[in-house]
Image (cartoon, rainbow, N blue to C red):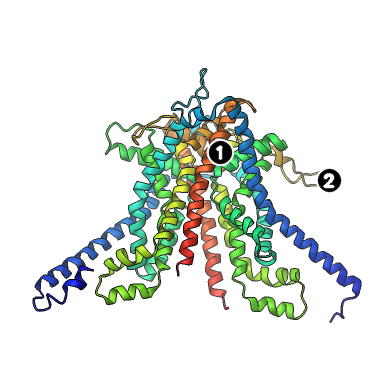
Amino acid sequence: MSIALSLPARASTDQPFADHLKRRHRREVIFIVLGIMATSVGLIALAMLVVDLALSGLTRINFDFFTNFPSRRASQAGILSAWVGSLLVMLVTASIGIPLGVAAGIYLEEYAPRNIWTNIVEINVSNLAGVPSIVYGLLALGLFVYGFGTGRSIFTAGLTLALLILPIIIVSTREAIRAVPWSLREAAYGIGATKWQVTRDHVLPAAIPGILTGVIIGISRAIGETAPLVTIGALSFIAFLPPSPVTGTFPFISFAWMFEGFTVLPIQLFNWVSRPGQDFHANAAAAGLVLLAVTLMLNAVAIYFRYQLRKKLKW
Amino acid sequence: MASALTVSERNAQKIREKIVEFFLLLAAVSSVFVTLAIVFVLVYESFGFFVTVPIMDFLFGTTWTPLFADPKYGILPLLGGTMLSTLVALVFVGPIGLATAIYLSEFASNGVRETIKPILEILSGVPTVVYGFFALLFVTPALQTFVPGLPGFNILSSGIVIGIMIIPYVASLSEDALRAVPQSLRDGSLALGATRLETALKVVLPAATSGVAAAFILGISRAVGETMIVAIAAGQQPNLTFDPREPAATITAYIVQVALGDLPHGSIAYQTIFAAGLMLLLITLVFNVIGFWLRHRFREAY
């Protein structure tokens, strides 16, 4: 501002202005350098995190690490019960969270009338997204474990994480559906399709990549969650596997595994990092590497879907 | 092709439409039930707690020793731990996040921005228990070379790592807000002879204030609720202190600590974690409401 005011008076003698301008440009260069440094802080932190995990944990990663149960001897301990537990918990989470979240998203975007009730549901969803994960753990402890009596089980854990990622799935479903152009719906309505037919046969297929992106990001968040599972009492020393979901006798499918005690990868990591001693810390690092690899892979898949979506988007 | 539907077929279709809509509505309403259930459980269990412990002792007491023989239930030490770790995170991420956002939005080329933003967003996808490992076994030892006498558990390293965790919230969302400022404002400023830096700091940033503030609020809300980093790296002793070099417990770390033990259901110690959780929920709710309001303003601006 001061430049604009002083410019006419100094028109004849340009020297002070030129000096000032030089200073202003120098300030800009300094800021750009600072900006690049600030941006690299995040990138360097990420790199250090990965390198640190790899340096301390990579030597522990071998075939036995995936096929051994946890053990009191660090060198023999593995993550078999942990990764099986994570897988089973995710199975429950996905089969509850995805239908519920997608259905809620469809309702809010395609069916809901614009009124105060819909508004309340919407504000509620965005508020749920901001609730700390450990509070979901308290909900699960008070309501599921002691209220409904589902115990400290795989089912309780899966249900809890499903509720935790519900807002993520709802929001991404809504965004994906919103991006489907009206002309598509109008064409379908025009040849006499009902609302559900339009939604099921035309809107949903077009919205699938966007919905998948949200689902994958939600699942990758759920895999890494520790706090809510600590609260419901996931055990850290589990040296057995839950009963198999497939059985030899009729009806060949068993749901007994859902109500077993369990551990998951993040809990196992937490247990190892809390112990004193380099050996267990190496195990923790190795488990961290596995966990990080899984979540990064899921995120990469999600980014790929988003990219495909952008490429295919013709409307 | 099929002929027109008969009357009974059409009626069946109408009924099917209604049934589908009912189930979709049920799914949408279930999210409200989740909220109600959370509030119910926390309030119900806390009620049992506040019957025994006067609410004033809880809010203003300076000693938190619920597991001792002579229990004291003052939440201030836990609240202080939460505030201190959040403050450290904010002091760390504030300048870095803002400079990153301004650089990416106003100076970096499209290619650089499109490459760096997704990489930065990975930081929010890293499981927090992995961050806890990083804080305890990398950041703390590294800090101990600069800060003599730093104990193995401390708020400083947890706060810094929480700060790293919320870089995507602060930087990436602030960048979105800055980029949403119309180009015409920048053009006007540049045409008046301002440099790009002057334009960024005196025109673009003020115009994006509410969006940037919303990004920071969201980051703060995350930091307040962060659990595993502090549970692993900050130590779990309630400690009313303003020195980030000391170990201290946060509200979240206390809940984890109690949950790891095996407290009898219905005991007062069991109820403390729900009272602490209620406190935590109220704090994050305040931040979320402020953030919601700011985002709303930000959306209306242009």
Q: Is residue B55 above or below residue B24?
A: above
Q: Which of the two discs, 1 and 2, sits closer to the camera?
A: 1
Determine the CA span between mark 1 and mark 2: 47 Å
Disc 2 residue type? Phe
Quadrant that contains the N terminus of chain A: bottom left
Q: Which mark is residue A266?
A: none
Q: Give the secondary structure at mark 2.
A: loop
Residue A199, given in percent of the width and then of the height, sits at 71, 69
Any mark on residue B278, and which? 1
Disc 2 chain ID: A
- Are tags 1 and 2 found on a single chain? no
> Of the numbered discs in the image, which one, if any, rests on residue A250?
2
| Up/down of A28 relative to B54, above or below | below
Labels in figure, total: 2
Q: In the displayed structure, does residue B153 sit left or right of residue A149?
A: left
Residue at 55% across, 47% down: A131
Query: Which chain's residue wears label 1?
Result: B
Q: Residue A255 at x, y = what percent?
A: 75, 43
B120 sits to left or right of B8? left
Above-or-below relation of A275 to B114: above
Q: Position of residue A145 (x, y in %)?
A: 67, 36
Circle 1 — which element? helix
Q: Is residue A290 left or right of residue A114?
A: left
The percent position of residue B274, horizontal first and vertical second, equals 58, 34
Q: Quadrant of residue A113?
A: bottom right
Q: Amino acid at mark 1?
A: Leu
Work out which residue is located at the far top of the displayed protein and give it.
B69
Can you see residue A49?
yes
In this rendering, does residue A64 appear at all? no
Which residue appears at 16% of the width and 72% of the height? Answer: A6
